[in-house]
Amino acid sequence: MAEGDPESKGEITRLLISWRHGDQGAADQLFSVLYQELRTLARRQLRGGKDATLGTTALVHEAYVKLLESSRVDVKDRGHFFALASRVMRQIVVDYARRKSAGKRGGNEPKAELDDNAGASSSTVQELIEVDEALKKLEALDPRMGKLVELRFFGGLSVEETAEILETSERTVKRDWQKARAFLYHELSRQKAE
């Protein structure tokens, strides 16, 4: 059963509902079924990082533990689960970056960029934190657009995947992605000027 099949999506939704109702066996089965997709999401989160201390497997397992701790969250379906997993992984990566940068500020590392291929490219620890802070401001102004950036930049999801999760058209995702990038670029430029 392929993960994109309607039958598979129905099974994933069934497992999510059971997990939400406290069935630990469903949580374990869900993790097993979605493990490779979670690893792909983790690789996207970590793309371009210079430090391999926080690896893909560690990120997936830490996210799994955090997701289990929040098992009462109302996860509706597969798309909602991946949006939640993307948010949890973002928090883990940013928290890791904050801890790592506690002793050092700046440096001559490459810059983080928002590109059309999504994902963080060669991001530095400090710049990952700056992007997260700018994203929090965007989320305060427009929560849906903040979620779009989280899915595209931190989750590395495609336009198609993002449109499915946000239940909107690909055209809207592309238009909003341009607006969000402009906002974040302006915000990051302002931060650097201070």
Image (cartoon, rainbow, N blue to C red):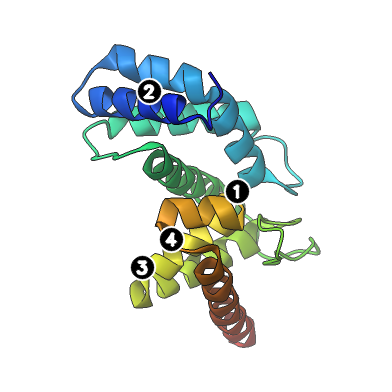
Between residue 191 and residue 48, name the one nearer to us: 48
Amino acid marked by disc 1: Lys
Residue drawn where x is 40% and y is 15% of the image: 29
Between residue 7 and residue 136, name the one nearer to us: 7
For the view shown, which residue lies furthest in the top direction? Answer: 25
Q: Position of residue 50 (x, y in %)?
A: 77, 46
Instruction: Determine which residue is flagged by label 4.
Output: 147
Could you tell me which secondary element the residue under label 4 belongs to?
helix
Estimate how packed mark 2 is, as few (under 14), some (14 to 19) or many (20 or more) residues with alpha carbons within 10 Å: some
Amino acid marked by disc 2: Glu
Residue drawn where x is 50% and y is 49% of the image: 90
Amino acid marked by disc 3: Pro
Instruction: Determine which residue is flagged by label 2.
Output: 11
Relative height, residue 125 to residue 73 (above, below):
below
Q: Earlier in the sequence, mark 4 or mark 1?
A: 1
- Quarter of the figure that contains the C terminus: bottom right
Q: Earlier in the sequence, mark 2 or mark 3?
A: 2
Between residue 22 and residue 137, name the one nearer to us: 22
Estimate how packed mark 4 is, as few (under 14), some (14 to 19) or many (20 or more) residues with alpha carbons within 10 Å: many
